[in-house]
Image (cartoon, coloured by chain):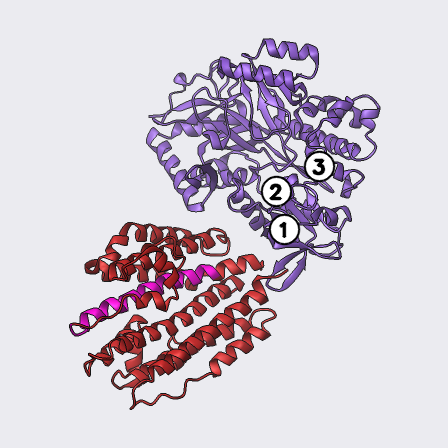
Chain colours: A red, B purple
Amino acid sequence: MLSRVAERIYWMTRYLERVENTARMIAVYTNLLLDMPRGVDIGWYHLVTLNDAEDWFEARYKVKDERNVMKFLLSDTDYPGSMLSSLRWVRENMRTTRDEVPAESWEYANEMSLFVQENLQRGINRGTRHEFLADVIKNCQQLLGLFEGTMSENHAKIFQRLGRNLERADMTTRILDAGIGILVENKEHLLPTTEQIVWANVLQSSSAYLPYVRFQRASVKGPRVVRFMLEHPEFPRTIAYCIGAIREDCEKLPRSDRVVRQADRILKSRYTSLDDEEGIPHSELSDYLNELQLRIAGLHQLFAETWFDLS
Amino acid sequence: MAIDWSKYEPGDFYDEIISASGNARLPARRLVNYLNSLGDEELQARRSAADVTITQMGITFTVYSDEGNIDRAWPFDIIPRTISLNHWQKTAAGLEQRLRALNLFIDDLYHEQKIVRDGVLPEYILRESKNFRPECVGISPPFGVWAHICGTDLVRDRDGQFYVLEDNLRVPSGVSYMLENRSVTKRVLPDLFDSDRILPIDDYASNLLEALASLSPRRVKRPSIVVMTPGIYNSAYFEHAFLAQQMGAELVEGSDMVVADDDCVYMKTIDGLERVDVIYRRVDDLFIDPEVFNRESVLGVPGLMRAWKKGNVALANAPGAGVADDKVVYAYVPQIIKYYLDQDPLIPNVETYLCVNDKEREYVLANLDKLVVKPANESGGAGMLIGPHSTKKERKRFDELIRKQPRNYIAQPTLSLSTVPTLVDGGSLEPRHVDLRPFIIQARKTYVTTGGLTRVAMKKGSLVVNSSQGGGSKDTWIVDTGSK
């Protein structure tokens, strides 16, 4: 397979996953707002810092309020990480690899793109946001399902999975960090239940609530949630699962020794200092998540060196 | 209600389906009977089925506009055009003859230039040729063939005879649409393929593959063959992808390839660098190698010419083949055939006036309103003057252009292109003008497509068949009528 084609398929699913995760992140924040005691500032701007997009945001907006943050994350075409920009890159990468993806994907992607463009305002308004985001997630799942159900198990399929899993792992670290962020921001007026609400929402944003409960058979507690999202080997959005799947896929690809070693390194780097009965050491965990993000970025760098950037 | 042929009036033109007496021509007899048996509604239903099929199959072409590039559904008319096998065999022989002679001619130009020394081709034509590439002098590609794939445009005049309108020897396109037109027609008029003896056309991709493989510099069982495209913004990208897919070849862009220190071409794959043996390039000469030609080109591969000259990679078509695509050279093709093959041309040229010759130029300038004036080295119908449809201002501009650079212009009489019944808006059949582009492949062997791509001017009275300017296309049937 040509390096360029492999790279485009990989980015196609990375951007697709980014669209879905943007929707999921915004959904957590919007939901939380409903459950929080009066006076709690959930800090919409945190969604911007989580994506390391402060410079982009500040170049365009002065007021860091909900409306501006929503406009920025959903519809800002100057910001490459916005939902609209990501969708554009999904289509652009798909357009150039149409021979490798199922015939219907182009149609699905166009429909989704059209839907998002026509309904952006619904996403920006709080009253209609939930339904809009649910539709976006549905559209993304539809495309992923198409890939899963109709692509032959060949290199193209492997690269589409690599893109999806890498982006997903990265976003899982960010969603956990989002939970910590809200708790830190509101240290002063936290109610005893607040912490539980935040972590329950974190789980829900990843559709992980039921799998968590079934696995833990215990109430929602910060340390357990974090451990679940980092280490559970079976739920498809955890770090352990995503990186494990990446490792497995890489072994099927040529010249993958270095990539496999890097994946192993991530899998072995457990975060140990979590005790169910004590609280979460916020800043320490936040540092760990940042470290994890860097390692995931390192994994991408190795993909590029191994398969994409030949000279 | 069945079709009312009494209202079908091709007028003064040669209609390929209905003869002057109003009867169906021999190869079209079954087709016409069949069409008569369909009601208006049924005909419309078949037309809608074709539209749906085209959308579903994703058959598109790209149109450039200010708002960006758009993929448009391929415009297609369901009524096929029929030609008898007997007539086609003679035409195919003529096309083979022509391409063989042209390849001998190109090879001669890059070696001894005997045809110039023998005074058959005036020296000035070569000296002032825009597409002669001095970089190619002395190179001997396999089998002495430079133009491996040629898409010759044919037209039928009032007498029903085929004439060559132009030879496209650089990067001719359209063959994918020829193949797709047949797949669509098989779906919407399946009954006729049972009863009529319509010759199949689907061996093109395998013949192309065989021809390309025979050019491989390495004697390996499965040479590595690629289709090189300028990328998704090219109007023929659909075709590049289609052909790559049909041949099981990689579809590459210039940036996918490198020329290494060993002067061999490699493509970048996830397995590492992989040797490339044959490049079916759909990128113009001037853009294939920034080291040699256009330095700004990002479509090419630096060092590609070096690799080709050393014989480490085959290029189809070879760089420099376009020298024979010159419309002034075109006028000399009958002499070229005579010179190299000692044969008379089997397919005549359209009468052509060379503006460089004083007498002919005078005639052209005096008759600008009646003639079609073409620049010698453009392709795709660019920069033309269609006399009968021109304004005074346009004619004045061409008068000046011709006087300034007579070598760069030729003129031809306005042609009476033949017509074929075409389903128009409103649901009736009306005559529309068509041309035909067969494709000829030459490498170890020579091969001509069975028929070719029929393009049709969808507007009443129009002679413009280009898809970018409102042209459509039809399936082309070579029908075995059993007669000799």
Is residue B350 visible in the rendered structure shown here? Answer: no
The residue lying at 55 percent from left, 28 percent from top is B382
Residue density around tag 3, few if under 14, some if 14–19, many if 20 or more, within 10 Å: many
Residue B118 image position (x, y, % from top left): 84, 23
For the C terminus of chain A, give its image quadrant.
bottom right
Residue density around tag 2, few if under 14, some if 14–19, many if 20 or more, within 10 Å: many
Q: Are marks 3 and 2 in contact (CB under 8 Å)?
A: no
The residue that mark 1 highlights is B226
Instruction: Tell which subunit mark 3 falls on.
Output: B
Q: Which region of the structure is painted magenta?
A: A11-38
Residue A196 image position (x, y, % from top left): 24, 80
Q: Nearer the viewer, residue A127 or B200?
A: A127
Q: Are marks 1 and 3 on the same chain?
A: yes
Residue B320's tag is: 3
Q: Secondary structure at mark 2?
A: loop
Q: Nearer the viewer, residue B271 or B129?
A: B129
Q: Of marks 1 and 2, which one's residue comes earlier in the chain?
A: 1
> Above or below — where is B256 with respect to A248?
above
Question: What kind of secondary structure does the magenta stretch mostly adopt?
Answer: helix
On screen, residue B263 versus residue B412, left or right, reads right
- Residue furthest front as drawn: A62
Is residue A268 visible in the rendered structure shown here? Answer: yes
